[in-house]
Amino acid sequence: MNKDITIQEALIYVMVLMSAADSSMTDSELASIGEIVKTLPVFKGYNADDILSTAQDCGAVLQEANGLDRVLTLIAETLPTKFYDTAYAVAVDVAAADLNLRQEELRLLQMLRDRFSLDKLTVAAIERAAQARHRTL
């Protein structure tokens, strides 16, 4: 990897990947990313105005040869193991933001589960919690 990123940027990369997985970043997904950055304690001290430039940096790596694998490797190498479940949780929240999970998003979630070696109970708890948070009337 030719670029070092912070833990906060790695988490944003995860959210950008999830938002872009189906080739369209919806307004609700982008709003969800902004809200996550503003509210999660892990983003304390991160300037929310930098989200766009971080997203563009992620996009630039994605455009390189083997871009998806390079971004996933960069994320996994940057995040301490204790943040793997956090990364998966923010990915699930972004995927759930538009209330429409597409096949590409499901595949990316599978790739993240595999890359982070998350156990089935952790995955189920994260997904169930997201389902409860995003339920509508």
Image: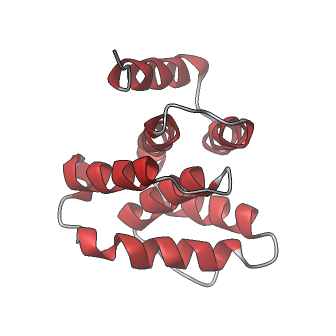
Q: Does residue 12 lie above or below 124 as drawn? A: below
> What residue occupies the far bottom of the structure in this picture?
2
Observer-nearest residue: 25 or 9?
25
Q: Residue at x 69, y 38 (%)?
A: 114
In which quarter of the view is residue 1 placed? bottom right
Residue 27: give x, y in percent of width and height.
43, 54
Observer-nearest residue: 109 or 86?
109
The scheme the figure's colours follow is: secondary structure
Q: Does residue 66 lie above or below 130 as drawn? A: below
> What residue occupies the far front of the structure in this picture?
137
Quarter of the image with the C terminus is top left
Taking the image as shown, residue 129 lies to the left or right of residue 23, namely: left
Observer-nearest residue: 51 or 68?
51
Residue 15: give x, y in percent of width and height.
49, 53
Q: Residue at x 48, y 34 (%)?
A: 96
Q: Residue at x 54, y 25 (%)?
A: 123
Residue 82: give x, y in percent of width and height.
42, 43
Q: Residue at x 24, y 47 (%)?
A: 40
Observer-nearest residue: 95 or 24?
24
Q: Does residue 93 lie above or below 16 as drawn? A: above
> What residue occupies the far right of the structure in this picture?
65
Residue 98: give x, y in percent of width and height.
48, 38
